[in-house]
Image: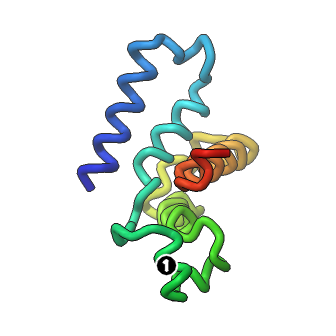
Amino acid sequence: NTHAADVTQRFATLLTKSELIGDVFGEMEVLAGVLAAVIHDVHHPGTTNNYQVQLTSSVARQFNDQHVLENQSLCLGLELLEPGKDTNFLEGVCSRDEKHTLRTNIIALVLGTDMLEHFN
């Protein structure tokens, strides 16, 4: 996905150019930001949450009309980091508490991409 690559690159550039790494954001926060940038639009159909809700789509029903597309992206993206998955590069690298904090931060960041949240 070109969009995900662009957002991830822009995030990394902002962090490095602003020298926020280390001063403001620690390693785990940076990792959460990078992973959130990568997964924030996984399987995005190119429609809005409102469209999905009005359509009563399966994804809108699955997530009870709340942050529909963001929750779908989180569900699919975080599945890759589940214990025992070949894609879970965190296994043996992060403590249980670090994984929990990382997951919590990723969820907050991706839910924050819901356009409705941009005005709150």
State the residue lying farthest toward the right.
Answer: 97
Q: Residues within 10 Å of mark 1 (few under 14, many from 20)?
A: some
- Report helix, strand or loop for mark 1: helix
Residue placed most toward the observer, 81 or 53: 53
Residue shown at the point (53%, 17%) measured from the top left = 21
Quarter of the figure that contains the N terminus: bottom left
Residue shown at the point (35%, 31%) measured from the top left = 10
Residue 34 percent across, percent down from the top left = 46, 39
Residue type at the position of mark 1: Gln
Evaluate whether residue 36 shows in this view: yes
Residue shown at the point (60%, 11%) measured from the top left = 23
Q: Which residue is mark 1?
A: 52
Residue 81 percent across, percent down from the top left = 53, 58
- Quadrant of the image occupied by residue 17: top left
Asked if 92 appears above or below 71 in the picture, the reply is above
Number of labelled discs? Answer: 1
Evaluate whether residue 84 shows in this view: no
- Quadrant of the image occupied by residue 82: bottom right
Q: How is the image coloured?
A: rainbow
Asked if 57 appears above or below 68 in the picture, the reply is below
Residue 120 percent across, percent down from the top left = 68, 45
Residue shown at the point (57%, 45%) measured from the top left = 118
Residue 59 percent across, percent down from the top left = 52, 81
Residue placed most toward the observer, 31 or 37: 37
- Horizontal arrangement in the rendering, residue 51 relative to residue 7 (left or right): right
Residue placed most toward the observer, 8 or 101: 8
